[in-house]
């Protein structure tokens, strides 16, 4: 099974690029998890993905946030949101199950400068997400959590630790919140396989950052420990980010390959 997480920064703007990428480069992806779709559910271009063999499940809002799972693998028990009025004001989580495997797709808050409401909201969101996992699952369950986590976990995950020090997504409080979340029983699959390799998933549009590789690793595929023996590879596909037309997202897709054959 190949699963892809991709912050598309507007699904309607990126639709043609994504379909071209699927048709020409990655026809073997089984599950796509999109973040920042920025459309209400009825406006998600599901029919375009249906033509390539996917069924899409969406949890969107107008102009902001929103997540979707498009899967060639049958999903059941699909849940949209946390089922919590406060935390579902922003559409940030959708998940479902295939056999005994849970796929959870999230778009974590970007946050804000230290001391702002957005800064505290982000820290509280991670705390609540960990509580949510504890209430519904155990670390012994087979769970894959993917998405834009809006945290560059370590200094290796930014192009210049001095320049990026104490910026949004690199502040110690954010990193601590993310580490505490991982301590629930989750493994950062990319860093598990490549402990010393620097690879980014986000680059600013300004100043040709993608060509200078001045980026951050903000997108993750996490899994519980029972799945580590199934993990084959995790990699970033730069092709969709290095387009000039159609205009790309500021993120590149991250793909994990799991072997579930018996």
Image (cartoon, rainbow, N blue to C red):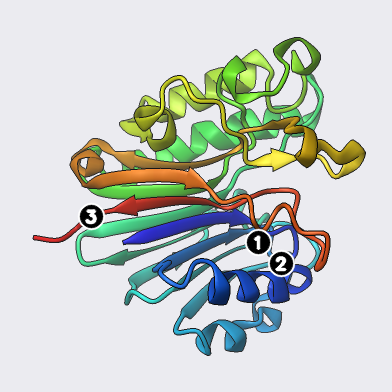
Query: In the picture, residue 8 is in which quadrant?
Result: bottom right
On the image, numbered disc 1 is attached to which residue? 66
Q: Residues within 10 Å of mark 2 (few under 14, many from 20)?
A: many
Q: Residue at x 75, y 49 (%)?
A: 250
Question: What is the number of the mark on residue 61?
Answer: 2
Marks 3,2: beta carbons within 8 A: no
Marks 2,1: beta carbons within 8 A: yes
Between discs 2 and 1, the one toward the N terminus: 2
Q: Depth check: give the residue in front, 160 or 122.
A: 160
Looking at the rendered structure, the secondary structure element under dot 1 is loop
Question: What is the number of the mark on residue 259?
Answer: 3
Query: In the picture, residue 2 is in which quadrant?
Result: bottom left
Position above or below: 98 against 230: below
Q: Residues within 10 Å of mark 1 (few under 14, many from 20)?
A: many
Between discs 3 and 1, the one toward the N terminus: 1
Left of 240 or right of it: where is 101?
left
Q: Where is residue 178? Give x, y as percent.
A: 52, 27
Q: Residue at x 69, y 58 (%)?
A: 36
Q: Nearer the viewer, mark 3 or mark 1?
A: 3
Q: Residue at x 71, y 67 (%)?
A: 61
Q: Where is residue 129? Give x, y as percent.
A: 48, 40
Marks 3,1: beta carbons within 8 A: no
């Amino acid at each position: 099974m190949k699963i892809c997480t991709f912050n598309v920064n507007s699904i309607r703007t990126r639709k043609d690029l994504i379909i071209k990428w699927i048709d020409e480069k990655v026809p073997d992806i089984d599950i796509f998890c999109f973040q920042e779709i920025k459309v209400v559910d009825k406006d998600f271009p599901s029919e375009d993905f249906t033509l390539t063999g996917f069924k899409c499940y969406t949890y969107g809002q107008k102009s902001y946030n929103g997540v979707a799972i498009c899967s060639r693998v049958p999903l059941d028990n699909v849940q949209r949101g946390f089922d919590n009025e406060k935390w579902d004001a922003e559409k940030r989580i959708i998940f479902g199950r295939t056999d005994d495997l849970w796929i959870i797709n999230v778009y974590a808050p970007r946050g804000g400068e230290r001391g702002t409401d957005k800064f505290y909201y982000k820290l509280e969101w991670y705390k609540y997400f960990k509580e949510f996992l504890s209430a519904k699952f155990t670390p012994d369950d087979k769970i894959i959590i993917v998405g834009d986590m809006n945290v560059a976990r370590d200094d290796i995950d930014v192009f210049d630790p001095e320049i990026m020090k104490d910026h949004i997504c690199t502040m110690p409080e954010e990193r601590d919140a993310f580490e505490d979340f991982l301590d629930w029983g989750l493994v950062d699959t990319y860093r598990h396989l490549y402990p010393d390799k620097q690879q980014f998933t986000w680059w600013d549009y300004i100043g040709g950052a993608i060509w200078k590789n001045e980026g951050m690793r903000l997108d993750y595929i996490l899994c519980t420990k029972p799945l580590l023996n199934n993990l084959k590879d995790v990699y970033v596909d730069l092709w969709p980010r290095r387009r000039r037309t159609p205009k790309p997202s500021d993120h590149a897709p991250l793909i994990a390959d799991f072997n579930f054959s018996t």
